[in-house]
Amino acid sequence: MPLRWLRIICGLVLSLVLSSGASAQTTQPVPSEWEGAVHQLAELLVGADADALTTSLTPPPVIRSFHSDTLQSPQRLYTLTRGSAHVSARAYLQIPATLATDLSADFSAAETVPESARTAMAPPDDAAAKRANETAAQWLAHVLQPAKDQVTAAIVLWPDPRRASLSGPVRRATFVLVKGQLIDGRYVICQISVGDPLEPPR
């Protein structure tokens, strides 16, 4: 049986035309400055200060949902993520070769995620993990389309149960894919794509 999260990603991937030429990065150290920027963004997304999030995103990046080309504001992004719990915040140099297994490990360690969801995200075997990593690399490459000098990241959040109960019993993770670039000595976030890959397009 495939990973549950592989089905999550495939739910989006199957609705897209993927480039067969996407290649994952080899193992290289990620600059600590980019890791710091990703972790700061993850903290601000779930924090209590919407203005701090807006201020940190300067100059303003392109922000879209997975299912729409409509541009969104940092304030709208904040309404989707505020109060959530961290599951994962992973920074990469380019297209990651291990995104699936990285997120699976983070789900396993996330005590705020229900046990049933954590168990469902565990790879059944090495072959399934390999397929999941390849699919995840294609998905991220299609969504972010990073240039050679750009870096990427994946943030995963688990919704606040109080807010989730208002929209129904289904609770799933929110994925935040991020693209950045080194400009004048600092990493600047230039694109954020956000949403639930299993949510049907509206």
Image (cartoon, rainbow, N blue to C red):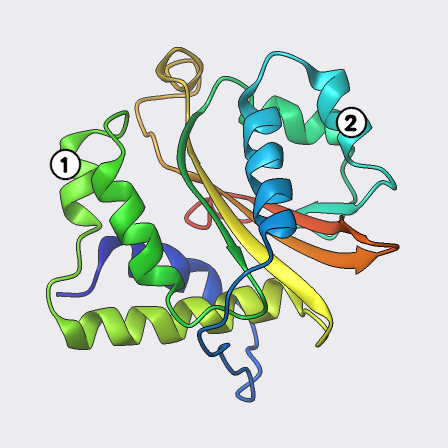
Residue at 61% x, 63% y is 143
Left or right: where does residue 138 sit relative to residue 104? right
Say which amino acid is labelled 1: Ser
Rendered location of residue 72, percent (x, y): 76, 38
Q: Nearer the viewer, mark 2 or mark 1?
A: 2
Q: Secondary structure at mark 2?
A: helix
Nearest to the observer: residue 8 or residue 36? 36
Residue at 47% x, 60% y is 12
Report if the CB atoms under discs 2 and 1 are less than 8 Å apart: no
Residue at 81% x, 26% y is 55
Say which amino acid is labelled 2: Thr
Circle number at residue 116:
1
Rendered location of residue 132, percent (x, y): 31, 69
- For marks 2 and 1 on the same chain, the one whose residue lies earlier in the sequence: 2
Cα–Cα gap, marks 2 and 1: 35 Å
Residue 14 visible here: no
Left or right: where does residue 58 sit relative to residue 80? right
Circle number at residue 54:
2
Residue 68 visible here: yes
Q: Is residue 142 above or below residue 160?
A: below
